[in-house]
Image (cartoon, rainbow, N blue to C red):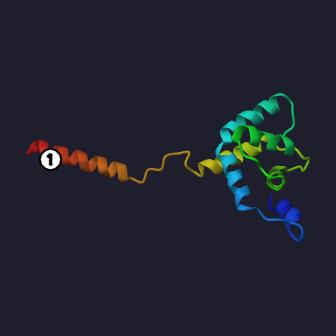
């Protein structure tokens, strides 16, 4: 993945970065990844390929953001493994859903809640014996 990005965007005088507005639009698009997943699944079921135009259309209609052509090209550079100009729905959606969760798919118990429950129970037990 990194090799494709470096090959495409390194040492090109005309390569541009990502503007703040483009980043925020992409972030908003990814926050609606479940709706995007549904839309792309319908495209996949219908037999339509997920190309740059399709992704841009889904972003506009589902997430209500206008992704720039440069951002769309960057996304395809990252996720189009065989470089056929079509995005793999399962890989793209799976990676983006994991990014959204950031390891929060399972509750993280630090022990604080159990400690507080034990303190309350102990206080109630002591109070009832007095």
Q: Is residue 130 visible?
A: yes
Q: Residue 16 in the image: x percent, y percent?
A: 83, 65
Q: Pick the quarter of the image with the N terminus.
A: bottom right
- The quarter of the picture where residue 34 lies is top right
Q: Residue 61 in the image: x percent, y percent?
A: 74, 37
Viewed as shown, does residue 8 lie left or right of 118? right
Identify the residue shown where x is 58% and y is 51%. Answer: 103
The residue labelled by disc 1 is 126
| Mark 1 nearby-residue class (10 Å; few <14, some 14–19, many ≥20) | few
Height in image: 51 above or below 44?
Answer: below
Q: Residue 18 in the image: x percent, y percent?
A: 76, 62
Element at label 1? helix
Which one is in front, 79 or 126? 79
Q: Pick the quarter of the image with the C terminus.
A: top left
Residue lying farthest right? Answer: 84
Identify the residue shown where x is 88% and y is 64%. Answer: 7
Viewed as shown, does residue 8 lie left or right of 62? right
Identify the residue shown where x is 78% and y is 40%. Answer: 89
Q: Residue 87 in the image: x percent, y percent?
A: 83, 44
């Amino acid at each position: 993945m990194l090799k494709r990005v470096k090959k495409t965007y390194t040492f090109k005088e005309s390569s541009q970065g990502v503007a703040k507005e483009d980043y925020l639009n992409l972030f908003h698009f990814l926050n609606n990844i479940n709706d995007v997943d549904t839309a792309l699944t319908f495209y996949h079921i219908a037999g339509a390929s997920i190309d740059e135009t399709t992704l841009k259309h889904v972003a506009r209609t589902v997430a209500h953001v206008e992704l720039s052509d440069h951002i769309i090209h960057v996304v395809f550079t990252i996720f189009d493994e065989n470089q056929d100009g079509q995005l793999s729905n399962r890989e793209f959606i799976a990676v983006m859903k994991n990014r959204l969760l950031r390891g929060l798919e399972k509750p993280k118990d630090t022990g604080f809640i159990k400690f507080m429950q034990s303190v309350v129970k102990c206080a109630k037990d002591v109070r009832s014996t007095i």
